[in-house]
Image (cartoon, rainbow, N blue to C red):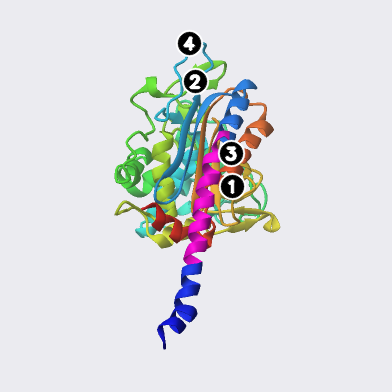
Amino acid sequence: MRLNTYFRVRLRPLLSSICACLLVIFLVSAARAADQPRIDSLMNEAMVRNLIAGGVVLIGNRDKVLFEKAYGRISPFPDAPPMATDTIFDVASLTKVIATTPSILKLAEEGRISLLDPVVKWFPELAGKGKDSILVMNLLTHTSGLDDVPLSSANPMQSAVDGAAAQKLKGEVGSRFHYADLNFILLAELVRRATGAPLDLYAQVSFYRPLGMADTAFHPKEAARCSGTISDDRVLFGEPQDYLCRQLGGVAGHAGLFATARDLSRFCRMMLAGGTLEGRRVLAKRTVDQMTAPYFSRGGTVVRGLGWDISSPFSAPRGQGFSRVSFGHTGYSGSSIWIDPATDTFVILLTSRLEYKKVHEINKLRGDISTLAAQIFGIPVEFGDMARFNDE
């Protein structure tokens, strides 16, 4: 083949494709710089309306952090210190997906438990009480039919188990989605019964230490670095907002974890990379895939992963720009995470929430931040590899 023919047939289309990709990358970079003040506007407006005292927004992909900024103050007190990007937050129900879910999936990966284990295998207290059909997987997907129960101060964990045994199930196991903290309180106890180690120790050794999440723990050592949460008209620093978690000693499967946005970004990057971060593997890729695969309930109207939310009444942080395979979770304290493998994007929103009755408003903030994150930082799938190559 002559050189001019080879260029016309082979090289010209390749060069055109490369030029198109580079143009898209340039335009995306320019749009990012121009649109980032829109994130500032959303956060500033939320503070003006006293929805939050402050917060941290962090956006990234599997390779790095793309945007990180702190806003406002750590509490409603007039003399409160300014929020910092390394402020430690009570992440509330993010505990379910940053601690409990990966711990259960890690144990399943190692063959120490099975997701198809009947719960009565690990909780014989439930045997013969109409709970024999509940599987570990049902606890993870909130399809167990269990509802929350008050805990005894004398023996809170045993009262949780006894409450699960005594109650009547709400609907058919596996078909009805009913979000209940009790599911994850039991899962944390399952970790202890399967390993002999409490959830906080198991998660620290299995995930936080190897991932370099130095500020992630159930009992933060530096309360002065913590953002405040409001509970019963008190402002708490370094103490779980959730009452049931406090009854359980601060370590629970549904709440109690504290972390910085930067630490959570390392966990998100690990998830996007299929269980590995900077050469350290903490989960098998098949485990991450299993964790984020869709499980349907309510006749297909609710879609959950194992622990993770995909499409449900709690999916506000999905916004308008993330794909149908994206997943995440929220926390009552004002925290949320959403991760999209299709566009290689994740967004973390951590806030010092002031107003808890305005559920619609905090959900709108979560959704609007995610929508902007997807618009500004989400890379079209076909350009993802080229964009990462260009950034190196």
Question: Residue most toward the top?
Answer: 79
Residue drawn at the location 66% of the way across and 44% of the way down: 313
Percent x, y of residue 301:
69, 54
**What's the distance in space between the residues labelled 2 and 1, CA to CA?**
27 Å
**What's the distance in space between the residues labelled 2 and 3, CA to CA?**
19 Å
Specify which label sits upstream in the sequence, 2 or 4.
2
Amino acid residing under circle 1: Gln
* Circle number at residue 73: 2
Q: Are the residues flagged by discs 3 and 1 in contact, CB closer than 8 Å?
A: no
Q: Is residue 332 above or below residue 339?
A: above
The main secondary structure of the magenta stretch is helix
Label 1 sits on a secondary structure element that is helix
**What's the distance in space between the residues labelled 3 and 1, CA to CA?**
10 Å
**In this orientation, does residue 161 appear?**
no
Q: Is residue 19 above or below residue 329?
A: below
- Residue, disc 4: 79
Magenta region: 17-37
**What's the distance in space between the residues labelled 4 and 3, CA to CA?**
28 Å
Residue drawn at the location 36% of the way across and 56% of the way down: 112
Q: Residues within 10 Å of mark 4 (few under 14, many from 20)?
A: few
Label 3 sits on a secondary structure element that is helix
Amino acid residing under circle 2: Arg
Specify which label sits upstream in the sequence, 4 or 3.
4
Q: Is residue 138 on the magenta stretch?
A: no
- Residue, disc 1: 375
Q: Residues within 10 Å of mark 1 (few under 14, many from 20)?
A: some
Q: Is residue 153 above or below residue 106?
A: above
Percent x, y of residue 324:
60, 56
Amino acid residing under circle 4: Asp
- Residue, disc 3: 369
